Structures are given as structure tokens and as C-alpha cells.
Image (cartoon, helix red, strand yellow):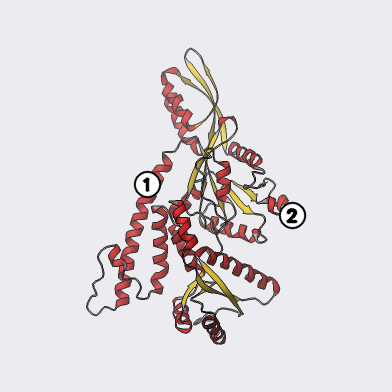
Amino acid sequence: MKEALQFFETHKPRERAALVAIITESDEPSRHKSREHLEELALLADTAGADILFRVTQERPKPDGALYLGKGKVEELKMRVEMENVGLVIFDDELSPVQLRNLETELGVKILDRSGLILDIFASRARTREAKTQIELAQLEYMLPRLTRAWTHLSKQFGGIGTKGPGETQIETDRRMIKTRIAHLKTKLGDIEQQQTTRRLSRSNELSRIALVGYTNVGKSSLLNVLAADKNSEVFVEDRLFATLDATTRSMELSHGRKTLVTDTVGFIRKLPAKLVASFRTTLSEVVEADILLHVIDVSNPQFEEQMQVVDLTLRELKANEKPMIMVFNKIDLISDEERAGLKDVRSRYPHAVFISAGRGIGINRLKEEIERVITEESFEITVEIPLTHYEIASRLHDLGEVGERTFTETHVRLTLRVHSRNRERVERLLATAA
């Protein structure tokens, strides 16, 4: 199945496209940043299946309210679109419904903004029922204020709605259908979220949970494959933005037989559509509920510090920024010795950071040591004596912590346990029943 999907994505027709961006500041750092953003937009377009023929930028204090660009620049863009037979123009910022409609009228080709492009990529790469539902919800909520007459096909998918009421315009009928579909998808996602919660609660309580977070295409999936105990269930890896969308959990073995659960989550990106973050709450709940976050950073990317800021901002939006976090600087093998020496400031700011190459297996043991250090800091050790008449309590304690020593007397069993802080109350309640 995976091979068939890859074949389709490789051989599907590619669109001829142009990129457009506004530069709001005239200084060279702002121009450089805009060029970097435009380069990332080109990578997104490539992932979506477009060939970029040219790029257009304009320096303006702010986008034009009606056309995003100035009128003269739009006319210039139209000439190039016609001359080079471009069928798609992609804008680096989110367009308002008015801007989108006016640009389509002026240019006569399909118009996408960055948000729409990201949603299109997610839609093409979603594999699980959960991801497909989340993406469809985000797309519909994004498209609702931007409606054209392209949505009547939804009546065939759900609800049988589609009969035009007295005095009702077609656009109103389409809007009603989409709102009904949105309500249905929200209910469906609620059911999926409940199932996910039940599944997470059924996991062994003694295992710490770790979530891999980071910008898209920094190597999270490659790292998960290296850390996973089972090398026969590797996660799909591709050198493209958003190669994987679905959260994937694997078991990882640490020293002394200790195990933990590691989850790969969807990558973040600058200007990530708010609707998409909201729709992916069930996937991103793995981040919220994790005990430890591994923030994976592509240190070979010149913009890695800006990418770190994007991830930090998203984690704050998820209220997950206070969790124990290990900074993992990946792809260390792709930078020069001089560039490594230049990381002195980064090392001083993050003294517990780990520098690795997931692709070459460099620094993985050091990373595991750091994970064990954090797990130990987030747990406590306790020694208890349980009457043999209540040995079932000792058995349940095994499920809530890691047993270090176990000694039997004629009447009691003495246990030394290391328990994660999140299980403290459950352990105390169990011990109270044995008192």
C-alpha cells in the first residue's frame, strides 16, 4: 500500500506555479528573512506537486486590502502568468476572502495562500481515519468564508442536504451543507478523542511517555526509528516537509531493562493555520500528556533558531511549554567543524542539550542517558512493606513503578520502588489500603 501511494505521488501530474510574497521592511535582514520564507514556500509547493517557474516580491508597508499586491504589480504578475502558462499562483501569507476572489478575477488562474497549501499537503498525506477527519474539518472551516459554487458534491457524502429552499441562493445552500458537515466531523472527532483517551489509559502505567516535537523535516521520524526497540516496525521517512502526519508510538529500551514509550508527532511550521492546530487536538494531545518532550532541531538549517521559536510558540499555545524538555540538535554530521565551533553560545544556553545524527547513529547513547536522567528527576524512590496477606497490592505496585529490590520475610514483602510523580497519589491510596 505504501509503495502504491509513493508511486502515485511520484507520477501524478505536476502544476506550473508561481510564488508571491510581500516584504514589509526594507532593511537587508528583513529581505533575507522574506527570501528564506519564500524558499520554504517553494519546498511546500514541491511537496504538494508543483513546479515553481518564477517568484514575485514587492516591498510594501502592508498588503493591499483588495489585491494583496499593488494594482501595477498585479498587472505585471498577470503578464508573466500568461506568458509562462502558469496555472497556479501561491501567496506566502493568508489571503482574505476578498483578496482571494479579486485575485482569481484579475489573474484568471487558481490562487492558493500558504494556509491553503499546507492544508492541501495534509489532505494528500493523511493516512489514518483520525488524520483524514481532522484534515477535512480544518479544510471546511478554512474554506467556509471563501465559498464558491464548488461544494455541492458534499451532499452526496453526508446528510442528503442539497435541495434549494425558496428564495435561497446557491451559496447559502452550499454554506448550510458545509456547516452540517462540520458539525458531523466535530462529533466524529469527539468519538475518536474518547477512543484515544481510553487507549492511552490502557497503556502500562510504569512507562514514562516521551513525545518528539519539532519543526517539520528535522528528523523526528528518523530518530524514532533509531530509538525504537522493534527495528521491524520502522516509521516512513522522506526528505520532504510533512512526510508523516499521524502520531506513531514505539517502545524504547533504556538501561537495566527500563522501557519508555516514544511518540512521533506532526511537525510544526511557521504560519501554521490556526484551524489546523485546533483540528489536530487529538494528535497533539500526545504532546500535552507526555511526561518528557524531545525538541528535535535541524542544526544544519541556517534558520534553526527561528524554527525553535516557532515550536516554542506552538507549545505555549498547547500549554505544554512547562514540561521537562530535552533539546536534541540533530544532523550534526551535516555541518562543518567551523560551524560546530560556532555552537558555543547554543551549548551555554542549553547545558543539557544533546547533539546527534539520527541518520548515522551518532550521540544516541548520550541521548538515552539524558532521557534516563530526566526520568529519574521526575520520579521518587520509596521503600514499603506489604503484608503477605495483601500481596495483590504488591502486584499492583509493580504496575505503577519500577521495582529495584524485593525482600521477603515470614509476614511481609519489602519493596524498593521508583515511581513517576504522576502516579504518587495512586501509590499512596494503595498503601493506605494495606495499612
Using the image as rendered, state which of residue 125 and residue 180 is in the foreground.
Answer: 125
Choose top left, top right, bottom left or bottom right for residue 140: bottom left
| Three-letter residue code for mark 2 | Ser
Q: Residue visible at 54% across and 80% down?
A: 84
237 to the left or right of 100: right
Task: Give the numbered dot on residue 195.
Answer: 1
Q: Residue visible at 41% across and 58% down?
A: 134
User: Would you call the spot at circle 1 few (<14 residues within 10 Å), some (14-19), or many (20 or more)?
Assistant: few
Task: Report which residue position mark 2 lands on.
Answer: 336
Q: Taking the image as drawn, is residue 149 in sight? A: yes
Residue 259 horizontal/vertical position (percent): 54, 35
Look at the numbered disc 2 and give the secondary structure of its residue: loop
Which quadrant of the rendered structure holds the C terminus? Answer: top left
Look at the numbered disc 1 and give the secondary structure of its residue: helix
Using the image as rendered, state which of residue 325 and residue 363 is in the foreground.
Answer: 363
Residue 89 horizontal/vertical position (percent): 51, 75
User: Would you call the spot at circle 2 few (<14 residues within 10 Å), some (14-19), or many (20 or more)?
Assistant: few
297 to the left or right of 93: right
Residue 33 horizontal/vertical position (percent): 65, 69
In the image as oriented, which residue stretches furthest toward the top?
Answer: 410
Label 1, label 2: how far apart the Cα atoms are: 47 Å
Q: Residue visible at 58% across and 75% down?
A: 54
